Image (cartoon, grey):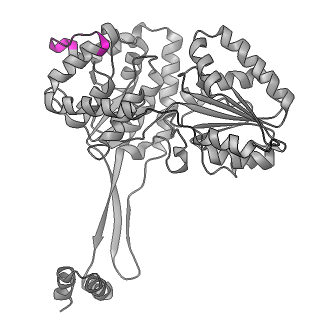
């Protein structure tokens, strides 16, 4: 874990190293993924059989081996603990309500030149959702991906998920039932992403692929962008907590570890204006790690990528640091979080106040927890209904409207050296 102070003459150099550090897959992963995608494109189902046996220890033989039925998902829903059922239902209800408010409106109007203009929004025909099944399986991620697609009006929603040794997580299946998913394939990894993009004998191709995964899944999505749409290229999870000494250090330590436990390459950063409080949080992190079932992962993440930054004036200094880091999650556990929020330009999602831990946003708050990582919040947003929709503009001119704007179009066409463009306008002007 690194300890930085803004009063240190070397602070800018050290902080820049934190900002610029890359915790993502290297060229070796890119090469392996390219080979996998090439094999899936040419080999289809047979390639999926081979990769699933190799990586998941599971044989895709009969038709029943390939898919998880909706009946199995409904059974899983009825068999889980009633409190878990209630939690899934509450999460789904809140996620659905938040994303329904995102639905865009069509436009249709006539401008001052008499030209009718507008746009209509339509869902994609098919969306593929990747649901992890390796280090951890996340029913919350299934809800966060499936529900916006459903709200957007996507007709075919297909899930791919690895089932190591044939085992599937009952909570994931229960979440699939809650989201109304009827097509679930027992394949994972980069090969599953390739199957969704190219299609195989059994799996029909989709238009958009979303959902989290490991470095191979993320790289596969990156390489396939353009063949299909993707939500984003997601890297290791990250959290940035801004906290003053009026917080309980145990709370802040737990917030930092909520992301560290995801993966050894995750990153947790604390910005505070009190060195004594920073030391207390560091001690609490050490204590809590020893008590976590995910302690080994959290310890690797904290040791290798954790950062504590002590500043002199939290209100004056923190916003600029936040914007440079452009983190996936930003917690503002301070007296006036609204004032700091107004100064934040780059963040995946912001959590305001001492009673708003990031973990609530992961599950039941409503906004999507699929967020940009690796400083991509500078130019991208979290998953939304719009990721499953596209806009088609339309234009309509009558004689008067054409006479008003047509000559300018012809003039510009001639200027660009495109006479056929100009002629298609000028013939009508005559």
Vertical side of 182 occupied by 55: above or below: above
Q: Residue furthest bottom?
A: 430
Q: Quadrant of residue 141?
A: top left
The residue nearer to you, when weighing 49 against 250, is 49
> Does the rendering let one see residue 424?
yes
Residue 245 image point, x, y percent: 84, 31
Q: Would residue 364 be seen by someone viewing this image from the given angle? A: no
Residue 370 in the image, given as x and y percentages of width and height? 48, 35
Instruction: Check the picture and name the quadrant holding the C terminus.
Output: bottom left
Q: Residue at x 49, y 33 (%)?
A: 95
Compared across the picture, whether 184 is left or right of 370 comes to left
Residue 396 or residue 307, whichever sits in front: 307
Report the front residue among 113 and 187. 187
Q: Which residues are magenta?
A: 55-65
Is 56 magenta? The answer is: yes
Q: Position of residue 140 (x, y in %)?
A: 48, 24
Q: Is residue 311 magenta?
A: no
**Residue shown at the point (72%, 15%) measured from the top left:** 286
Along the viewing direction, whichever of 177 and 219 lies nearer the viewer: 219
């Amino acid at each position: 874990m690194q300890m930085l102070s803004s009063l240190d003459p070397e602070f800018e150099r050290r902080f820049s190293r934190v900002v610029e550090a890359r915790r993502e897959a290297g060229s070796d992963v890119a090469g392996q993924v390219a080979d996998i995608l090439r094999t899936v494109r040419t080999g289809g189902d047979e390639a999926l059989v081979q990769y699933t046996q190799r990586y998941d220890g599971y044989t895709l033989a009969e038709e029943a081996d390939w898919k998880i039925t909706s009946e199995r998902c409904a059974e899983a829903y009825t068999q889980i603990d009633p409190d878990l059922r209630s939690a899934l239902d509450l999460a789904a209800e809140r996620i659905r309500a938040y994303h329904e408010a995102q639905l865009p409106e069509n436009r249709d109007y006539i401008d001052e030149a008499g030209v009718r203009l507008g746009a209509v929004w339509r869902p994609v025909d098919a969306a593929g959702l990747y649901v992890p099944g390796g280090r951890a399986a996340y029913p919350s991620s299934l809800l966060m991906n499936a529900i916006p697609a459903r709200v957007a009006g996507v007709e075919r929603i297909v899930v791919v998920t690895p089932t190591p040794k044939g085992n599937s997580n009952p909570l994931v299946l229960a979440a699939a039932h809650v989201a109304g998913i009827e097509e679930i394939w027992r394949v994972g990894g980069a090969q599953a992403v390739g199957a969704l993009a190219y299609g195989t004998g059994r799996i029909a191709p989709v238009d958009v692929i979303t959902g989290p995964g490991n470095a191979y899944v993320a790289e596969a999505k990156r390489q396939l962008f353009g063949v299909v749409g993707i939500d984003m290229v997601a890297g290791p999870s990250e959290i940035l907590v801004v906290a003053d000494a009026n917080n309980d250090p145990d709370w802040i330590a737990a917030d930092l570890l909520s992301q560290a436990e995801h993966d050894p390459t995750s990153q947790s950063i604390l910005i505070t204006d009190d060195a004594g409080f920073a030391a207390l949080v560091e001690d609490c992190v050490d204590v809590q790690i020893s008590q976590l079932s995910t302690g080994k992962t959290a310890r690797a993440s904290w040791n290798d990528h954790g950062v504590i930054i002590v500043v002199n004036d939290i209100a004056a200094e923190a916003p600029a640091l936040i914007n440079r880091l452009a983190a996936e999650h930003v917690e503002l556990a301070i007296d006036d979080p609204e004032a700091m929020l107004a100064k934040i330009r780059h963040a995946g999602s912001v959590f305001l106040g001492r009673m708003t831990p990031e973990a609530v946003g992961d599950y039941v708050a409503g906004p999507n927890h699929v967020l940009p990582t690796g400083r991509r919040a500078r130019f991208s947003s979290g998953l939304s209904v719009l990721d499953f929709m596209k806009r088609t503009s339309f234009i309509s001119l009558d004689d008067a409207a054409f006479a008003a704007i047509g000559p300018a179009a012809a003039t510009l066409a001639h200027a660009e050296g495109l006479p056929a463009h100009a002629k298609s306008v000028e013939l009508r002007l005559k």
